[in-house]
Image (cartoon, helix red, strand yellow):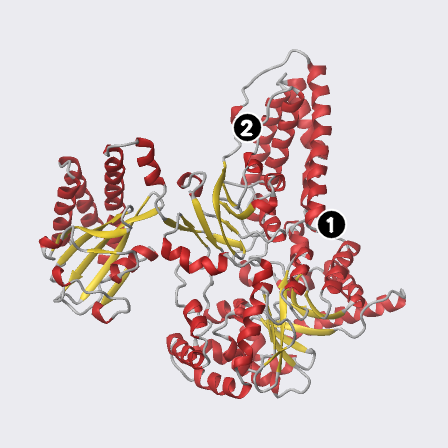
Amino acid sequence: MVGKLLSLLRNISEVIAGVEDTAQVLSRIVKILARSLEVDVCSVYEYDPEKNQLVLAATQGLNKSSVGKITMAPAEGLTGQCFKECRIVNVSDPENQPGYKFFAESGEEKYNSFLAVPLRSGGSCVGVLTLQRTSHEAFPAAVVDTARSLSPQLANLIFSAGILKNLARDGDTEESIDTIQKRSFVIAGSAVNSGVARGKVFRIKPRDLFNEIDHETHDDTDKELKLFEKSLKLARINTLELETRALSMISEADASIFNSHLMFLEDKMVLDAITREIIDERHTLEFSIVMVYRRYAKKFRQLSDPSIRERLIDFKDVMLRLLEAVSFLRAEKNGNRDIEERSGSWVVVARELLPSDLMRLPIDNIAGIVCEKGGATSHVAILAKAFSIPALLGVQGILDQVVDYDDALLDCHAEKIYINPDQEISDKYQHLINLTPQAEVTGPKGPTFTNDGQQIYLRANISLICESSLIENYGAEGIGLYRTEFLFMIRDYVPNEETQYEVFSKIVEAGRQEVTLRLLDAGGDKKINCLNLPAEDNPAMGLRGIRLLLQNKDLLHSHLRAVLRAGIHGKLRILLPMVSNISELKNVIDAINDVRQELDKQKIDYCKNCSVGIMLEVPSAVFGLEKMLKYVDFISLGTNDLMQFSFAMDRGHSENQGVTDCFDPVFLKILYDAGNVVMKTSGKEMTICGEMASNPLAIPLLLGMGIKSFSMPPRKIPQMREIIPKFSLGECRKLVKTAVEMETPDDVMKKVSSFLDRKGLTEVVSQEA
């Protein structure tokens, strides 16, 4: 197959080199492909951005007279779906597929298998390659792989031809280039904060001061050292100003991001290294800073822990701030950030966004953040969450694919950014974009009841103090999950008992009603620098959750003291993460009792009547649930981890599609059985805080399992409050009993969709399905 592919690529290259007319090139290519791949039909559809339609550009097998005449809108027919969603479509009997469209003039009625491969170039889809055969079987993997491998060459041919076509047009050349740049495309990334946003692109270009500064020497050591001393003072002042700005906008806990910056500016080894460059090598202060940064950057990049490597961004931020201070004191001009002169909403696009970059921008004007680099534990991710700014990181190549003032639509729920979206996409998102925080929460905020009178509690998931305002705004009935790990993530040192107590106290007070604090859930995908955890071959199944705390007695001890002391400020529930067996449970309960006795002896106030529960997120805990319930007051379903451990598949895996599905009858049966165990145990409660809790399609199933307390992102609460009164517990119980006996997730989805349709919730089905 490899030899055949190479031969095909060589043949196509020869055709492209030997013929200047693109139409002739495509005509010859489809003939070569049809013959080599042994298919009856090979066609290429080209996207026309001006008319916003796909056009049949070349074909071998369909009627030749249809070339240039068969057109379709993006998303129209199977070819349009392939283009719109930028995914491969491989089906048999295409006429039976949803969305199929028949073109009579093509003569395609005799073909019974269909393969469409998107042609991507420059970050956007420029066309579609389709193959058809008379047989009633989908195309084999070998053909699909070959077609996928050939697609970049075809895409580049179409893309290049489009550029030349635009440049050759009569009229203004700049306008033609702009037309190319404004084409619609979509890119995926990794969301670190949820939400939907729209605005014009504001690009922050890489600040490459480290490469711009020349290798220069000085002739006055004392002068350089005095400049160094003054520059350090100015850099520290600027850092404190940034921290003060953060304090006024976030909270005293979250602003600690800039503490690490001050630590770098006080670090004796760093400062001595710069001093040695000035004295020993006679380098200018600027070049001395550059040399020291490069040495430290190399060391950072060699570290095995990616979350610690991310701190290179903070070090870079500090060194740039120091260089700016030197530049200012030498009376050189600094580049301005002209976003401050622009009104309206902006989506900031950068290769990497430094914490100080974000703090210097007018926060009220930033609708979204998109970066090529960064992860969930980066400081920019934490700040984005603190400011409730939708943010997408890890968007490869985005900075080079957009220009200032491009129209950007950011969907962090689907983890995509649409650049210059067409009218169809715009219409789809318009109702979400138009919702202001005030408009989104109009409607009742009181208790929620099913239509047979059962009260259902809707609580909020939060991670930062600044999010506590959302509790009242969205009418949440307390906090169903406070993730204590974020307090640790944003620090380069372990917060002591008093620091934890201050933050947890504010959370418990802010919760107004019931507040569930989950103990530190570190390990796995939650990288926490200050704990200095060793690298593991399989961290998802290694030292994490409650077993990590039990291994670190001092950490657990101060953590429990802070949590129990904070509990006096409200109604506290303690949630234990990743408990896998009864021994772990009994050990941590013993630790809680030990801390209680210690606080009693010290005559320190603490919460004496808090509830204790476990996260149900591993299969072993499900099987041991009946025994564990003797020791706890409630359980909380962690559906995200429970799903991936039940199906032995990381939910973020690229090949995961269809493997983990919360509507899989097997998974529903796991939850259903757990619910039955809890319901037959007097005085116990089952709650849910995973992603499934905020899925409207799952709500009737979860109600049928006996769940009466749901914890979710606050913005989801109004929708849940609206749909829950449509259901009775009895009919939900019948629905879930039927669902767990089905065979596939699709079967369950059809059943649930039909159920919601009868309740007048068709719009919910269409939006979520």
Q: Residue drawn at (57%, 45%), measured in percent from left and top?
A: 365
Q: Viewed as shown, does residue 168 lie left or right of 314?
A: left
Between 44 and 629, the one nearer to me in the picture? 44
Q: Do we see residue 25 in this rendering?
A: yes
Q: Secondary structure at mark 1?
A: loop
Neighbor class of circle 2 (other Cα within 10 Å; few <14, some 14-19, many 20+) is: some
- Residue 259 location (% of width, % of height): 71, 42
- The answer to whether 544 is drawn above or below residue 301 in the figure is below
Quadrant of the rendered image containing residue 266: top right
The reply, left or right, for residue 148 in relation to residue 579 is left
The answer to whether 561 is drawn above or below residue 375 in the figure is below
In this rendering, which labeled residue sits more in front, label 2 or label 1?
1
Q: Residue at x 74, y 57 (%)?
A: 503
Which numbered disc flags the more N-terminal residue, 2 or 1? 2
Q: Quadrant of residue 262?
A: top right
Q: Nearer the viewer, residue 96 or 474?
A: 474
Indicate the amino acid at tag 2: Phe
The Cα atoms of the two marked residues, 2 and 1, are separated by 33 Å
Secondary element at tag 2? helix
Neighbourhood count class around disc 1 (C-alpha, 10 Å): few under 14, some 14–19, many 20 upward: some
Q: Position of residue 260 (x, y in %)?
A: 68, 42
Residue 377: x, y in percent? 59, 51
Residue 210 is labelled as 2
Please name the residue that numbered disc 1 is placed on.
Answer: 252
Q: Residue furthest top?
A: 219
In this orientation, does residue 305 appear? no
Residue type, numbered disc 1? Glu
Q: Is residue 238 above or below residue 95?
A: above
- Relative placement, left or right, of 474 versus 607 is left
Q: Position of residue 466 (x, y in %)?
A: 68, 55
Q: Is residue 320 above or below residue 596?
A: above
The total number of labels drawn is 2
